Image (cartoon, rainbow, N blue to C red):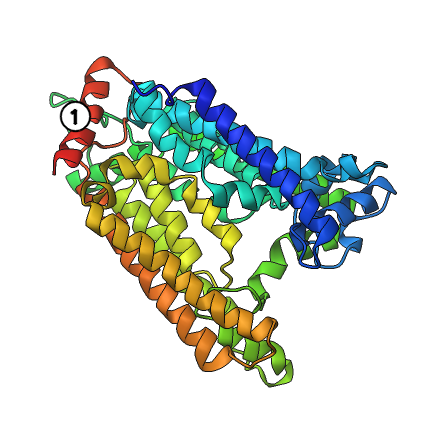
Amino acid sequence: MSPFLTIRKIFLSAIVLRVVFLIYGLLQDAYSPLKYTDIDYFVFTDAARYVSRGLSPYDRETYRYTPLLAWILLPTAWPGALWFSFGKILFALSDIVAGWLILLVLQSPGGGGMTTERALEFASIWLLNPMVANISTRGSSEGLLGVMVIALLWAVIQRRIIMAGILLGLSVHFKIYPFIYGSSIVWALETLTPPKLDEKTPPVPGRSHESESSSEAILNFFNRARLTLIISSLATFATLNILMYRIYSTPFLQHTFFYHLTRIDHRHNFSPYNALLHLSSANPDKVSSLRLESLAFIPQLAISAVLIPLALAKRDLAGTMLAQTFAFVAFNKVCTSQYFLWYLILLPFYLPYSSFLSKPRLGITALVLWIAAQANWLHQAYRLEYLGRSTFIPGLWISGLVFFGVNVWILDTIVKDIGAFSAPFPKTKSTSKQDAFIEGGRESMRSD
């Protein structure tokens, strides 16, 4: 066992990494005209300040989040410079908690049954990732959502269905996109042995074999686990939304949910829709009734919420969630660096049997292309925003298309890997035979 690969050293290193970024951020904010703190963090803290004064967080323009986030960040409104950094510290700690949950999932029978050393290797992809540490310490709240998503995966694997439903409802209320996981989880929660008709039971008059099979299939689909998950998640989601609506009325619905249907953000947006959204925002009076920003959801949701779950969820739930999130971000009309964390946190569950790891040349090529495509886009954005040169077309547009093409190629590889994975999601509580089967499936993929 490597002397570095211990729980204490890995987590201590992860904490030190984030402390260094936090201190560096304070210095950069104090002495550099280019601030370290993300603009969104000022939006969060301003909203928390409004709440502390008994006002609505939506009095702060561009606050498009659940009031829960503003409530959580209330200490940032307290006097003192240290309290202003409370949210950054909380988000950084959320990274650590998410890393701990990743470790638990990887060590669990349904998540791979890995040894502590091997699980730490893959958990370090999140814990020791400087990009993750940078984004959270700049004031992005994605770490909080990461805790919810990994806790949801852990609860499903452990067959704690009510807990999973509550976490799913909470995470969708907190940020809309986790709803795509609902279809995968429901599809994966299959009954191990469907009920069979007693062969000695005489047929019921007036009922054909086909009608019996159809009704049997429907009843079998809506098993106890699926119904429990659906009811508990919808109840949690509805309860939170009703509570927030009673407090903040229509602005809550408009800014938290409806706004995202028609948003036309065109800055800091890697999406291939970027240039079209820019044109729409520049000429709002000339936009046709067939709005691109609404139609963009059709291919995105068809792939991430329907096709991928149906094809893959019964093979590997965690890998399917990664593929869903990757597709959701790649096809989203708004794509920023923060969104990359949505799928990076799921990467440790897929990499152990991935082609990117078993074929190093392929993995290195994918990583280089992914980074190079971003760098190319950022170069065009720098020329636009700092040098004042018009690069929307063709520069940014072509750069966005190139990045999209790289993402589609990576997604194709991910889907093929999961489709070839030989260990289906466990349908009942884990047993020793199932654990051996799951680990055997992972080992066979690695050997390939």
Q: Nearer the viewer, residue 118 or 205?
A: 118
Q: Is residue 147 left or right of residue 398?
A: right
Image location of residue 446, percent across then percent down: 17, 35
Image location of residue 285, percent across then percent down: 64, 84
Image location of residue 124, percent across then percent down: 40, 32
Q: Is residue 134 left or right of residue 4?
A: right
Q: Nearer the viewer, residue 59 or 32?
A: 32
Q: Residue at x 40, y 25 (%)?
A: 103
Query: Do we see residue 163 in this rendering?
Result: no
For this orientation, the residue located farthest to the bottom is: 286
Kind of residue sitting beneath label 1:
Gly
Q: Secondary structure at mark 1?
A: helix
Q: Nearer the viewer, residue 109 or 128?
A: 128
Q: Is residue 11 above or below residue 65?
A: above
Q: Is residue 64 above or below residue 375?
A: above
Image location of residue 372, percent across then percent down: 37, 61
Q: Which residue is mark 1?
A: 440
Q: Residue at x 76, y 48 (%)?
A: 47
